[in-house]
Amino acid sequence: MKRKAQILAIAGTSTLLVAGSLLVVPKISHAEQPQSETTQTENTTEHSSQKNTSTVSGTTSQGITYENFSLSFHQLPALIVDEILAETGDEVTESSAILTVTKESYDALYTALKKKLRDASSTYETAKITYETDLLTLQSTYAEDQSAASLAYDTYINTLEQLALQVSQAETDYENAKEIINTYPNKIKNAKKTLKQYKAKAKQYKTKLEKASKEYEAAKQVLSEAESKLETAKSDWEALETVQQYIDNYTKEHTEDSNNITTLSAKLLADATEKKAAYEEAQEAYNKAKTAYETAEANFSKIENTYTSTTNKVTSLQTKISNYKETYQTACKNIKALKNTYQQAVSKEEKESISAKETYEQKCFTTEAASTNYQTEKESIEETLEEAKEAYEDAKEALETLEEGFTDYTWYAKSSGTLSYIAYESGQRIESNTAILGYADSSVLTVTFSIDQTDIASYNVGDSLSLQTSNMRNRVTGTIAKIESVESTGHSSSVTYNVTVTIDNADGNLSTGETVSIQSDMMKEDEHYAKEN
């Protein structure tokens, strides 16, 4: 990236001054106020990274503000001065014609800049498409890496959980076996004791059940006999009642036989009374037999349930004892194997946990590297796009600056003042870093430094630098206003170029004739900064 020079404000109007692009500066503003106190050997520029002890000096003189025209692109057709329309000492106003350039040189430069703009625009549009494609691919790869990292984490956690589960299960099995070996002998003993008690109770209940069964059957037999007698007595009584009813009806119809019938009726009544008493006696006997039967049945059912429950408990205890014995024998048989399994599970957990962690950490490292690579690649494609965009904007700005700087092939003054400097004559090429003209300005001072040819490439019009005056401890800030396009000395061993710097002196703290110095490498940009800016 090209480092942009500082924007210089203009009284009335202003134009961007950009190092490395076409540049118009109607009038340079005052320099910054003095800076904080420093030593003479420290780095005094905004972006300096190299230092040495050599210094260059110059003497302040009456201030001049300059108008510049600059191109950033190399190998472009040069603008050739056609005619100079003003002289040093002229009072000019804004839009006064200063010089013209040849139509051929202007058209050639315009065509070249137009082509650069078209090429830069095409490159920028292609770069935008490439950026979107590359970014999508990069994001897809990055998402896959992140997904793999998430999966690796899940796998790692799942592995730890499975190993812990295996240890827990093996430990539980081993502890259960120990518990069985320690407790089951006593359980078997107690169960056998309880079994013996239930067997004794079952025997007792069996005897009671047999007795109750006999009593129940006897009561059942008595009830059956009582029921039969009751039915007979009831039948006899009901029969006599029926006969008595018939006789009563017959007497009402045959009164002539009333004496014989009355005798018969009295006899039947006496028999009926006897049968009724027999029936009632049979009824009472039946009720007693039924009550005795129901009591015997309930007692038998109760004893039978108790006996069944007791025999079921005996059977259950026998099964439990058998299971206890089998479980105990199995535990005794497997205890060593279970202990070994538990110990192996613990050892496996220790080893495989470490292995799983190493695998996971390796994946994390790979993912982190992928993340770093993603950021690097993303920055790279963004930088490529940004470079294409800046190239397009530089080409666009260059063409605009040419069009704004020259109207009808003529350079017009951008402000009013007394001309104290005109850089060109007819037929000369307009150089990028050489001011076209300068105005006398009492609010600023100027100082010219001779910069060695090995350092001149680090200086650009518009750059700021820190200066040390001979009678002031504090530094002041100057702005590079002009760089001569030809060397000031031509010795083979030492070639230098004149660099003119303006210093704000609105407060009058400085005067003409003062010595001002800078370190010769103060304006050098480090390689990294130069690439980025």
Image: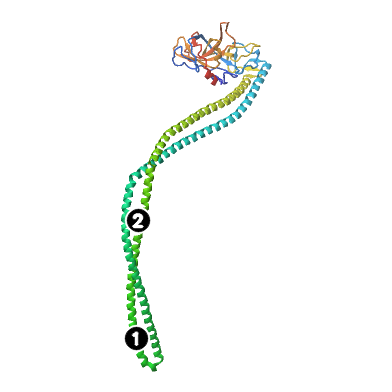
Residue at 37% in and 91% down? 261
Query: Does label 1 or label 2 sit earlier along the sequence?
Result: 1
Does residue 7 show up? no
Instruction: Determine whether, in the image, residue 520 is placed left or right of residue 395.
Output: left
* Colour setup of the view: rainbow
The amino acid type found where label 1 is placed reads Leu
Question: Relative to 129, does residue 185 appear above or below in the rendering?
Answer: below
Q: Position of residue 509 (x, y in %)?
A: 47, 13
* Residue positioned most to the bottom: 256
Q: Position of residue 302 (x, y in %)?
A: 34, 63
The count of marks equals 2
Q: Secondary structure at mark 1?
A: helix
Q: Nearer the viewer, residue 451 or 57?
A: 451
Q: Which residue is mark 1?
A: 269
Label drawn at residue 459: none
Label drawn at residue 314: 2
Q: Position of residue 203 (x, y in %)?
A: 32, 60
Residue at 52% in and 29% down? 370
The reply to whether dot 1 and dot 2 touch (C-beta < 8 Å) is: no
